[in-house]
Amino acid sequence: MQMNCSITHTLNQRATNEELEKLASLMEKNFFRPNQQPVIAAFISRNAIKNFLDGCE
């Protein structure tokens, strides 16, 4: 349960592109449980888009 709370807290934070790349790398290595992977993938996608748009301003 603590792991899930920690992940939820982390998902509410901003992430740098380097951090997103590390998360993607961990997903490729099956670091996260299958039920966590869609949430992590959505977080990576959402924040990558935010970072891209922030860079265009």
Image (cartoon, rainbow, N blue to C red):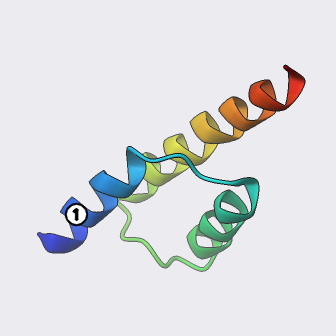
Q: Quadrant of the C terminus?
A: top right
Kindly identify the residue that appears in the image at 38 percent across and 44 percent down: 12
Residue 33 located left or right of residue 44 = left
Q: Residue furthest right?
A: 56
Secondary structure beneath dot 1 equals helix
Kindly identify the residue that appears in the image at 65 percent across and 64 percent down: 19
Kindly identify the residue that appears in the image at 58 percent across and 34 percent down: 46
**Residue 38's spot in the image, x, y percent?**
44, 48
In the image shown, does 27 or 4 lie closer to the viewer? 4
Q: Quadrant of residue 32?
A: bottom left
Residue 36 located left or right of residue 24 = left
In the image shown, does 39 or 7 lie closer to the viewer? 7
Q: Residue furthest front?
A: 57
Q: Quadrant of residue 34?
A: bottom left
Q: Residue furthest top?
A: 57
In the image shown, does 2 or 29 lie closer to the viewer? 2
Count the marks: how many? 1
How many C-alpha atoms fall within 10 Å of the one at disc 1: few (<14), some, or many (≥20)? few
Residue 51 located left or right of residue 33 = right
The vertical placement of 13 against 1, above or below, is above
Q: The residue under label 1 is which amino acid type?
A: Asn
**Residue 39's spot in the image, x, y percent?**
41, 47
Kindly identify the residue that appears in the image at 72 percent across and 63 percent down: 21
Q: Which residue is mark 1?
A: 4
Q: Quadrant of the N terminus?
A: bottom left
